[in-house]
Image: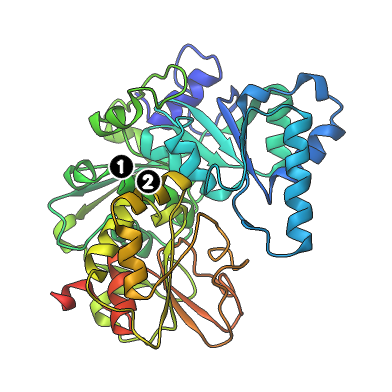
Amino acid sequence: MSTIAEKILGEKAGKDNAANAGEIVDCAVDYIMVNDITGVPAFEVFEELGREDEIRREKVVVVQDHYVPNKDVASAEQAKALRDYARRYRIEHYYEIGRGGVCHQVMIEDGFAAPGRLIIGADSHTCSYGALGAFSTGVGSTEAAAAMATGRLWFKVPETQKFVINGTLKRYVMGKDIILHVIGDIGVSGSLYKAQEFYGTAIESLSLSDRITISNMAIEAGAKAGIIPPDEKVFEFLNGGRVRGEYNAVYADGNEGDYEEVFEYDATEIVPTVAKPFLPENTAPANELDVLIDQAYLGSCTNGRIEDLRVAAKLLKGKKVNPEVRMIVVPASEKVFRQAIEEGLILTFLNAGAFVCGPTCGACLGGHMGVLASGERCISTTNRNFIGRMGHKDSEVYLANPAVVAASAITGRITDPAELG
C-alpha cells in the first residue's frame, strides 16, 4: 500500500513496486525547468561536467521571467547569457520575453506538467505542478545541471501527510485561504521534507487554478511536494492537444496507515485569511484586521491566472482604487494577459485606476515592478512575506487571496470582501 509520491518515484526509478519512504532512489526525470536567475549557474555547472554533447535538450525548459523586462545592466547581461546558452544548446523549449510568462504558469498551460510525471525545477515553487497529480519539486542549479547531463536525479523518498478538507466553502473563500489555513495550523516547518496529499469535497469542488495555488504554497510549510489526485477537471484541461506526450495518472491506495499524519478540516470554518508579516504561518481572518495599505498586488505564480483576475475584476467593476493606494495587476502569462483583454478584465482594472503590465516575477521577489519603500505595506496574492521580500527590510507584506486584495485596494485597508456586499 503506497502514496502517490512513493508510486511515482518508484516507477521513475524503474522499480517493479512503489518506493518506500526514506529510500534513496535514482529516477528518470521528465522535465527540468530553469529560469533567468537559476538557469545561468545551471548551464555553467553543466559545462564544467564536460558532457556538452550529451545534453538531454528535449527535457530542458528555459523561461525568462524573474527580471522581465530587464531592470538594469546586470539583469540584462544575465538574460543575454541565458539566451546564448539556449541558442548554443538548441533548446527547443525556450520562452523569450513576450512569448511565455511566469515559469510555473508556462509549464502548466503549455502541457509539460501532467499526472504521474516527475518534474524538477530550479525554483522552489516548482511544487505547483502537483495540482495536476505530478511529483514536482524545486532543486538547486547544480542538481538541474546534473539532470541536464544525465536525464536523472537521486531523491530521498519523502514521508507523506494527508490533508482532508470536506464541506462547502463560503463566499470569497479560495484555494489561497485553504493553504493559508493549513500553514497557519501546522507552521512553516510542519511538512519539512514531506509530501502533502490533498483530498475532500472542498478540494474536489475547486477549479484547477485554486488547486495550483494550494500546491504552489506547499513549500511554505517545508514540503517537498504538494499533490492533488487528478480528476476530470485535470484531464479536461490537458486533453485536446495541450499535453505533451503520454501520461499515466497515479493514485494512492487509500490506506490511512500509509500516511505519517492525517489532518482533517471543516471547509465551512475557513474564512478569507491573511498571513501577516513575516511568515506565511502568521495567519488571521481578514475581517479581524484593520491595517492601512500602500500597495495592492495581484499576480504571480500563486494567483495570476485568469480565474484570479476575474474574481478581482468583478469586485473592482464600477469602482475606483483608493487614492491612497496603488494597485498593480500582473497576469501570469501572455496567454492569460490576452484572455483578460478579450474578456474586458484589463479595461476594468484600468478604469479602476490600477497599473497593469505583462507577466513578470519582478515584484514578488522584490526585484522591480512594485518594490516597497521603508514603512510601506502591501496586500499581495504572492506566496512569501519574509522580511524584505518585496523591498525594504522595514516594509511589510500581507498575503491574501485575489478577492481580499481587490477589496483592500478599494477601501485602502485590509478588508474582507464580504464587507463590500
Q: Residue at x 58, y 86 (%)?
A: 374
Circle 1 residues within 10 Å: few <14, some 14–19, many ≥20: many
Residue 421 location, quadrant: bottom left
Above or below, 296 against 126 in this view is below
Q: Nearer the viewer, residue 338 or 231?
A: 338
Q: Specify the quadrant of the image occupied by residue 269.
A: bottom left
Under mark 2, the amino acid is Ile
Q: Which mark is residue 186?
A: none
Side (left or right) of 169 relative to 186: left
Residue 350 location (% of width, % of height): 37, 69
Does residue 86 lie above or below 7 as drawn?
below
Report x, y in % for residue 38. 69, 47
Q: Secondary structure at mark 1?
A: helix
Q: Out of 255 and 201, give the one closest to the viewer.
A: 201
What is the basis of the colouring in this image? rainbow
Count of numbered badges drawn on the protein: 2
Residue 212's mark?
A: 2
* Residue at left offset 61%, top offset 79%: 392
Which residue occupies 40% across, 55% down?
Answer: 304
Q: Where's residue 356, x and y in %?
A: 44, 65
Residue under pointer 1: 208
Q: Nearer the viewer, residue 276 or 59?
A: 59
x and y percentages locating residue 212 in the rendered image: 37, 46
